[in-house]
Amino acid sequence: MSNDIHSAGKSTASAIGTTFKAIGALIFALIKQFGLYVPILYAVFGTVLCLAFDLRLISTELNSILFWIGGGLSLITSVAITIYKHRLSEEKKAESCPIRARSRKFLCPNNLPYRKSKIDSPKIYMSNLEPDKLIHEYEDRFIVYQTDERGTPHYIKTEYKYRS
């Protein structure tokens, strides 16, 4: 009977440890995803100040108000930076497509949403016969673009390869 109690205690401790690991992983993922490093350091700094100098952060004193304003600003800044980084990554995706849609959803020349795929990656080159033509050669087709004086490509046509 003593072994049963001991093994039950081990399984309970293991379950609690697994739960704490999962919660810790979730918190770390949220911190990483939203870039909350600065607000967390700010909170740690505030905790140290409270312990070292006996500050009361939940009051109407000027120090308390300034602390909460600073915390709010650091949180807003972190979220703004995260949104900005996300926007940059979307713009990089759009730049990899020769034609950029004016909407928020970027489309590649085949009018499908952008997908990064090694299988669907074209060979891109300028035509030797017509230097103002940009060619995207896929496994099953060619997509031809006309470049203007600024080098901006404009879709002309799609030619499919014949398979024998």
Image (cartoon, rainbow, N blue to C red):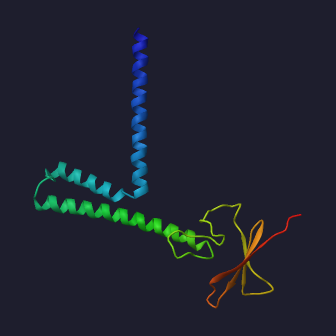
Name the residue: 71% across, 69% down. Answer: 122
Q: Position of residue 126 (x, y in %)?
A: 74, 81
Residue 69, picture quadrant: bottom left
User: Left or right of 145: which side holds 80?
Assistant: left
Q: Position of residue 9 (x, y in %)?
A: 39, 20
Q: Position of residue 142 (x, y in %)?
A: 76, 73
Classify the position of the C terminus by image quarter: bottom right
Task: Using the image as rendered, state which of residue 62 and residue 125 is in the foreground.
Answer: 125
Name the residue: 81% across, 86% down. Answer: 129
User: Left or right of 148: which side holds 2?
Assistant: left
Name the residue: 10% across, 59% down. Answer: 61
Residue 79, picture quadrant: bottom left
Considering only vertical position in the picture, is 89 above or below 51?
below
User: Left or right of 87: which side holds 129?
Assistant: right
Q: Position of residue 34 (x, y in %)?
A: 40, 57
Task: Using the image as rendered, state which of residue 5 and residue 49 is in the foreground.
Answer: 5
